[in-house]
Amino acid sequence: MSKLMALSFIFSALLGFNIIYLSVAELQRFQHEAKADGSLSLLVIGDWGRRGAYNQSHVARQMGIIGEELDIDFIISTGDNFYDNGLKGVDDPLFYESFTNIYTATSLQKQWYSVLGNHDYRGDVEAQLSPVLREMDSKWLCLRSFIVDTEIADFFSVDTTPFVEKYFTEKEHNYDWSGILPRQNYLSNLLKDLDKSLKESTAKWKIVVGHHTIKSAGHHGNTQELSSQLLPILLENNVDLYINGHDHCLQHISSSESPLQFLTSGGGSKAWRGDVDWWNPKEMKFYHDGQGFMSMEITQTQMDIVFYDVSGYILHKWSKNKELHSTI
Ligand SMILES: [Zn+2]
């Protein structure tokens, strides 16, 4: 090999490395310690911000009671945080009216980890992501895609709204795509980052959170873009749960093809009574077309999921065991 060729080879390799390095940015990671005994408990709520209306305040009250009972460590919001059109800016009073002044119970003054929903994209997205809101209410934290690392469980939050084609073509609503375009680069980088982070994860439980459904019998139904682009990555990496909102219901669908469970917690305020399609009863474990929320208790060997209605009554329970040491 001539000196010139060798130099050009090294230069290309360096350039290639730089390109790869730039396109595979790490997802932001937050460490959240589990309890001293290694267990973790949390609540999941979605589709909520309506100034307390449509039973939002009632659900909040029951979350406070269950949150105290379970001594929760944090709360996950599956998005559509502020209706109808997200926040207008960091000084939008809706932030206090729909969040700070609603979730007032002592047990709920924990870290909230929130993703964005399609309604949030109709407002000033950067406002919800802004550290200014975190200064106004320290329990608030919203990012596009990120990881909460609790050692026993890793929670991978994925920004699902930019996957959905119709938001880019429909005329009746405006979406704030700042920070997203060019869209295909954004999506392919996000999927690469997620895949890499899932492969590197050594946590016993792998949980992925997004706003949009992958499987749902509710009003919106399945999200095709996620079935084709996100689902294969979850299956390949042995993800235990996919948790979403978007459909205003509580729902648990299992799969005959894999251990992956699909959980919808989108009952934070307005619900769509009776708006449900047929689903194979072998897979449909539970569907509730009213308001409510979900709790999770996790240890190294067991995960317990419970769904509650607007009055705090338990509607559905599901548990999964994992051996302490894999026998494979
Ligand atoms: Zn939605």
Image (cartoon, helix red, strand yellow):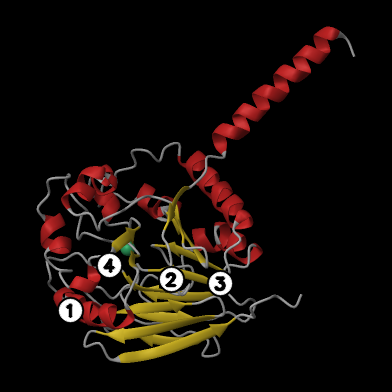
Q: Mark 1: which amino acid? A: Arg
From this viewpoint, is residue 197 visible? yes
Work out how far the residue at label 2 is from the one at label 3, CA to CA, in angstroms.
24 Å
Q: Earlier in the sequence, mark 4 or mark 1?
A: 4
Image quarter (top left, top right, bottom left or bottom right) of the C terminus: bottom right
Mark 2 surroundings within 10 Å by alpha-carbon count, few (fewer than 14), some (14 through 19), many (20 or more): few
Work out how far the residue at label 3 is from the one at label 1, CA to CA, in angstroms.
29 Å
Q: Earlier in the sequence, mark 1 or mark 2?
A: 2
The percent coordinates of residue 156 (x first, y second) are 48, 59
Q: Nearer the viewer, residue 214 or 130?
A: 130
The residue wearing badge 2 is 36
The percent coordinates of residue 216 (x first, y second) are 44, 75
Q: Is residue 67 above or below residue 99?
A: below
Q: Determine whether the residue tagged by mark 2 lies in a helix, strand or loop.
A: loop
The residue wearing badge 3 is 240
Count every numbered label the image shows and give the total. Answer: 4
Beta carbon of the mark 4 residue lies under 8 A of ligand 1: yes
